[in-house]
Amino acid sequence: MKSRSYKVDISGLIAGGRQTLLVDDVVPIETFEGIEFPQAARVHLELRYVDRLLHIEGRVDVEAHGECDSCLEHIVRTMSVGIDERLDPGTGRDDDPFGENNVLTGDRLDIADLTQQTVLSEIPMGLRCSDDCAGLCVTCGINRNASTCSCSNGD
Ligand SMILES: [Zn+2]
Ligand SMILES: [Zn+2]
C-alpha cells in the first residue's frame, strides 16, 4: 500500500532557509478496528520552525466508514480534524519510540504516521451514528433508534 514515501524533508526549515513549508497531500489511512477509510485523507499542513521547535498546523479531511459502536448501523462520518503540534526535532523516534515525536525521524517528518495518528485520536471509542444513539435492545436486539419493543430492560 505504501508505494511511495510520505516523508517530508524539514532540514531546510531547520537551517533557516525557509520560513514556512506548505504540505498538501493525499494520504491513505489503513483500516483500524473495522473502521475503513476508502478514500485517501486530504492533508494540508503548514510547517514552521520557531524557537527550536517544529510547529505543525493544519487539517486532515477524511471519510470514515464503519459500524456504529452502539446500534451497529453502517455509517459514514465525514471528519475534519485540526492539527496543532509542537515537536522538538532534537528528539525523535530513536530516543522515544512511543512519544509523540515518533512522527519525526531526524529531519524527516512522516506525514502518513502523523495523519493516521491524528484521525485515530478523534475516534478512540469507535464510531457513533449520533451522540444520542439509543443502541440495540439488550433483550430482543431491535434497533431502538428505528423502532420500539415491549421488552422491559429496567430503564
Ligand atoms: Zn447508532
Ligand atoms: Zn426489545
Image: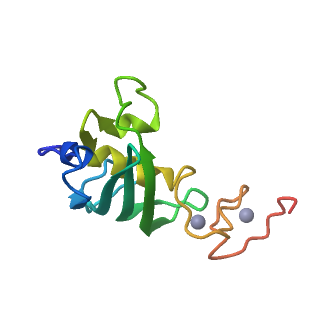
Q: Nearer the viewer, residue 46 or 98?
A: 46
For the point 27% across and 43% down, which residue is it? 110
Question: Residue 10's spot in the image, x, y percent?
Answer: 23, 45
For the point 82% across and 59% down, which residue is it? 153
Ligand 1 lies in quarter: bottom right
> Looking at this rendering, what residue extends furthest in the top direction?
95
Residue 34 visible to the viewer: no
Residue 131 visible to the viewer: yes
Q: Nearer the viewer, residue 150 or 7?
A: 7
Q: Nearer the viewer, residue 118 or 86?
A: 86
For the point 50% across and 56% down, which residue is it? 122
Q: Nearer the viewer, residue 139 or 11?
A: 11
Q: Quadrant of the N terminus?
A: top left
> Looking at this rendering, what residue extends furthest in the right direction?
154
> Is 154 displayed left or right of 33 in the figure?
right
> Looking at this rendering, what residue extends furthest in the left direction?
3
Q: Does residue 78 lie above or below 1 as drawn? A: below
> Is 127 displayed left or right of 115 in the figure?
right
Q: Does residue 138 lie above or below 54 as drawn? A: below
For the point 31% across and 56% down, which residue is it? 47
Q: Quadrant of the C terminus?
A: bottom right
Colouring style: rainbow
Question: Residue 61's spot in the image, x, y percent?
Answer: 35, 66
Q: Quadrant of residue 53?
A: top left
Q: Does residue 113 lie above or below 147 as drawn? A: above
> Is 12 displayed left or right of 54 in the figure?
left
Question: Residue 3's spot in the image, x, y percent?
Answer: 12, 44
